[in-house]
Image (tube, rainbow, N blue to C red):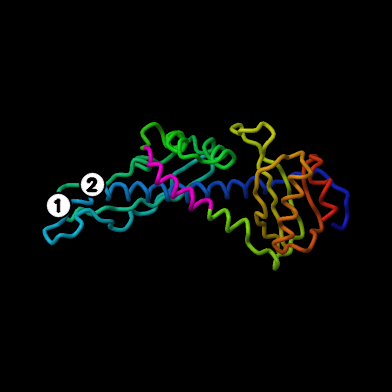
Amino acid sequence: MIDSNHFNLNKPDQNDLLQEVLREGARKMLAAAIEAEVAAFIEQYSTLKTDEGKPAVVRNGYLPERPIQTGLGAIEVKVPKIRDRSESGIKFNSSLVPPYLKRTRNIEEFLPWLYLRGISTGDFSETLKHLLGPGAPGLSAATISRLKQGWELDYYNWSRRNLSNKRYVYVWVDGVYSNARMDDRLCLLVMIGSDETGRKELLALSDGYRESAASREEVLIDLKQRGLKNAPELAVGDGAPGFWKVVTKL
């Protein structure tokens, strides 16, 4: 770090980037839940066959992509189509994203709860109801576990990506709290970097304690171990002492 002095500055773009992260997370999770719903629907009719002995109820592409307006902005949704080759009149309509659904007001409450507390198999059905209303169906424990494993793998790969070819001129650090957390002091530690071109990128996203030097040091050590060698020209953050106690050491 070139200068150990620090100043409290406004961060006009940080919230926008966090909103984008949450919005993309919502899109992926909703898509995975819809796919699970379709798979369960097809499985329900797995014994129904055509005269040729083939499955009668099969996937048949997707409906046109459409946006759902949320407190985080528009989330694009693609709902699969189902074909009934037995001509028995079987139709699929997603209960998660019914045709009339154009707006949900509760997603901004759902996402921080989901990210900062985590999803358990027992809580997921209630979370879907909170997001999409009391008519949202539950998912089986096995389906929830499979979805959760996929999300955990995505985060695992992202949090271990190589940073040796990265160079950031500025970094912003903050601790983001949610009203739904198991520990009153636990928060989401966020670090955003800006390169020479002004392009911003989310560097770190992990749970920890905003005032804790140990929590901040753990994040910085992890970044160094993944190849981030060059210190930024400027670090911007709030007055929490944890980050400033360790940043000049690394």
- The residue under the point 41% across, 47% down is 33
**Callout 2 secondary element:** loop
Q: Which residues are magenta?
A: 138-152
Please indicate whether residue 29 sits to the left or right of residue 80 in the image. right
Magenta span includes 140: yes
- The residue under the point 65% across, 33% down is 183
Judging depth in this view, the residue of 115 and 89 nearest the camera is 115
Residue under pointer 2: 91
Residue under pointer 1: 87
- The residue under the point 14% across, 57% down is 50
Residue 192 drawn at (x, y percent): 69, 52
Please indicate whether residue 105 sits to the left or right of residue 216 in the image. left
Residue 156 drawn at (x, y percent): 58, 55
Magenta span includes 49: no
Q: Which image quarter is the C terminus in?
A: bottom right
Q: Amino acid at mark 2?
A: Lys
Judging depth in this view, the residue of 178 and 214 nearest the camera is 214
Q: Amino acid at mark 1?
A: Glu
Judging depth in this view, the residue of 70 and 27 nearest the camera is 27
Whether 172 is drawn above or below 117: the answer is: below
Mark 1, Cα crowd under 10 Å, few <14 / some 14-19 / many 20+, is few
Give the number of the disc on residue 153: none
